Amino acid sequence: MGVGSRRHAVTRYLGRRAENDAEVSEFEPNRKWTMCSLSGPPWEVSAIFEPVEGGTRVDWIWSFRFSGVLRLFEPLMVGMLSRMSTKDLARLKDMMESGAL
């Protein structure tokens, strides 16, 4: 993983299949990474890692660059991503604590 790395994601949203591509635009090992969309609605996400007592704190920063009619969907996207992230991070925590990862 590093600047220029790309990924293709297939997800389900409101019962429909959605796909998008994204590229890592910033990468600092054990500290931060940022990824930007290459297809689909324009967005950027950063994960910032900070050591804390007993573990690591991860701060997620999402930004959207919707324009026109897509701006109407921004609150919906924020809510959806918040729910997805909460669920995904809980699943990741369970997997790490169980030794599955």
Image: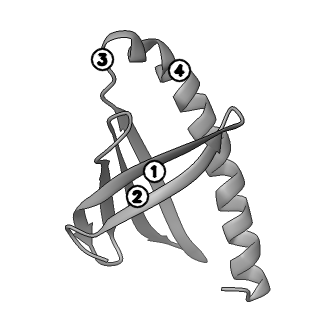
Q: Residue visible at 65% across and 44% down?
A: 12
Quick one: label 3 or label 1, which is nearer the N terminus?
Answer: 1
Q: Which residue is mark 4?
A: 75
- Residue 87 appears at what percent x and percent y? 71, 52
Vertical side of 96 occupied by 70: above or below: above
Q: Real-space Cα distance between discs 4 and 3?
A: 13 Å
- Residue 58 appears at what percent x and percent y? 49, 61
- The answer to whether marks 4 and 3 mark residues whose Cβ atoms lie closer than 8 Å is no
Quick one: label 4 or label 1, which is nearer the N terminus?
Answer: 1
Q: Which residue is mark 3?
A: 67
Front position among marks 4 and 1 = 4
Give the position of the C terminus as an image quadrant. Answer: bottom right
Nearest the camera: 79 or 4?
4
Vertical side of 98 occupied by 50: above or below: above
Q: Secondary structure at mark 3?
A: loop
Front position among marks 3 and 1 = 3
Q: Which mark is residue 60?
A: 1
Q: Real-space Cα distance between discs 2 and 1?
A: 5 Å
At label 3, the amino acid type is Ser
- Residue projecting furthest to the front: 17
State which quadrant residue 89 falls in. Answer: bottom right
Nearest the camera: 48 or 84?
84
